[in-house]
Amino acid sequence: MATSPKHLLAAGTFVLAALGLCNAPAFAAPEKNHPKAADVLKAQKAKKAAPSKSKSKKAAAAAAAAEDTWAPAEEAEPDITDTKVTEYACELNNKLTIYTNEGDDSHIALRWKKRLHRLDRVGTTTGAMRFENTNFRLIWIGIPSKGILLDSRLNRQLANECKSAEQAAPVVTPVVAPAVVPVVAPVVAAGAEEKKI
């Protein structure tokens, strides 16, 4: 099927008209008193006047920490008489001591950096022991293999890989001797002797 010049000319005209309509707004001169243009110019001036928000997250966090005027309220140290004492050795030679009371498993006393803190138990779904002091914003998480002390205000670890003497002891599994299976000789039924030919 041959395309006639008449059809080519019509198609070309159609394409040029479509291009002209699509690109007309892009080449049109902007209105001088357009209300939205004035708003955009005001916003650009305000953005230049405001401090740039291109600071890194670390710089913003450091600035927030410098401006932080938080101070813990004074609270009395907990009574640690008649308690079980467990000392923990942590990474970077940090040490802490936990005092537990056998009759009260919802509270512990934790000695950290020469200060004694009372922590309240918080329920967990994982089975880990979690204790918090909302005043000093300390969190102690204890699992069977180790413990960790966190600062919830600064969102960082204070002490990690904390292990008591019991947790630090190597796990020794008893050696079980392999089971002895008795060797049974084959039983030959009576009358089943070999026949010789």
Image: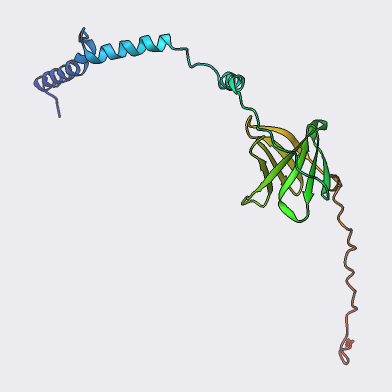
Q: Is residue 94 left or right of residue 142?
A: right
Q: Is residue 124 left or right of residue 21?
A: right
Q: Quadrant of residue 183?
A: bottom right
Q: Quadrant of residue 4?
A: top left
Residue 74: x and y in percent read 68, 33
Indicate the colouring scheme: rainbow
Give the position of the N terminus as an image quadrant: top left
Q: Is residue 2 above or below residue 48?
A: below
Q: Residue at x 72, y 53 (%)?
A: 105
**Can residue 57 be seen at all in this image of the molecule?**
yes
Q: Is residue 63 left or right of residue 7?
A: right
Q: Residue at x 26, y 12 (%)?
A: 37
**Can residue 197 be seen at all in this image of the molecule?**
no
Q: Quadrant of residue 20?
A: top left
Q: Residue at x 11, y 20 (%)?
A: 10
In this view, the residue in front, 163 or 99, is 99
Q: Is residue 26 left or right of residue 106?
A: left
Residue 112: x and y in percent read 77, 35
Residue 162: x and y in percent read 78, 40
In this view, the residue in front, 134 or 189, is 134
Q: Which residue lies most toward the left here?
A: 6
Residue 107: x and y in percent read 71, 48
In this view, the residue in front, 143 or 71, is 71
Q: Which residue lies most toward the bottom here?
A: 191
